[in-house]
Amino acid sequence: MSSTLGSSIVKKLLMSLSGLFLITFLLVHLTVNSFLLIPDGGEFFNAGAHFMATNPAIRVIEPLLAIGFLIHILYGIKLTIENRKARGSARYASGKKTTGVTWASQNMLVLGITIAAFLVLHIAHFWVKMKLTGDPLLEHTTITIGGVETEVENSYALVNYTFSYLWVVIVYVIAAVGLAIHLSHGFWSAFQTIGFSNEIWRKRLTVLGNLFAVLIGFGFSIIPVLQYLFYQG
């Protein structure tokens, strides 16, 4: 019994820590992506992308991020299945449906799989081309960094071209909405697991989680939409 309980606590802790790590990554990623909205021909975004690609700390964090995603997805699937079995047994024993459970918490598995599928597409669109295969659109361009002219990959051209396709924009918007719904539950749940579990903090974290979810969902939706409109115009 104690072994099973301990294992469950460890799994939830790993989910929470990896989730908090991913929350931080989303903020950084959205910040850099927001540079796409600056009307300077992509210079500021290319500078940000160059920094992310060449900074030693980012290079160390990148594989950790991949591991974090993997842990979060695998443990998320495992915990969701276990929780569904437990809730199913409780409903069967009592004859009543579980109450007080949000739609997001009941569908974290579906949301997680949807987001994971989107990540595969996102990696194929950008990471593979920027890190492995290259792309003609990434032909170097010159920008000014700290007063010094520097040759960098034209990441802006690749992103701008990718978002010229309406179906890609639609997929990204749907994924952003799914991510927002996922975060609306995952944000406060992660903090609750590491100790912020009293009623006062639960209410505060619920509000913060909803605000964060809206920020991420709106941010990752509006960027491809505006890029598409800019490209078409």
Image: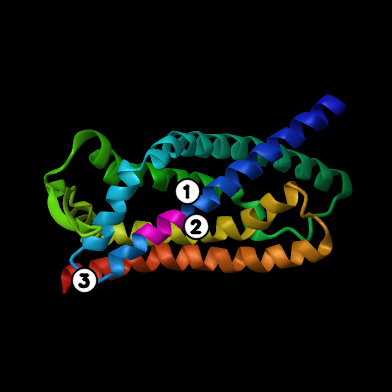
Q: Nearer the viewer, mark 1 or mark 3?
A: 3
The residue that disc 1 covers is 114
Magenta residue check for 88 = no
Q: CA distance from mark 2 to mark 3?
A: 25 Å
The reply to whether dot 1 and dot 2 touch (C-beta < 8 Å) is yes
Along the polypeptide, which appears first: circle 1 or circle 3?
1
Residue 79 in which image quadrant: top right
The furthest residue to the front: 147
* Quadrant occupied by the C terminus: bottom left
Q: Residues within 10 Å of mark 2 (few under 14, many from 20)?
A: many
The residue that disc 2 covers is 178
Residue 135 in which image quadrant: top left
Q: Nearer the viewer, residue 79 or 209?
A: 209
Q: Residue at x 21, y 61 (%)?
A: 43
The residue that disc 3 covers is 230
Disc tally is 3
Q: CA distance from mark 1 to mark 2?
A: 7 Å
Report the magenta stretch's main SS.
helix
Q: Position of residue 140 (x, y in %)?
A: 13, 48
Q: CA distance from mark 1 to mark 3?
A: 28 Å
SS at mark 1?
Answer: helix
Q: In the drawing, does residue 40 fall left or right of residue 80?
A: left
Along the polypeptide, which appears first: circle 2 or circle 3?
2
* Quadrant occupied by the N terminus: top right
Residue range highlighted in magenta: 27-32
Q: Residue at x 13, y 54 (%)?
A: 142
The reply to whether dot 2 and dot 3 touch (C-beta < 8 Å) is no
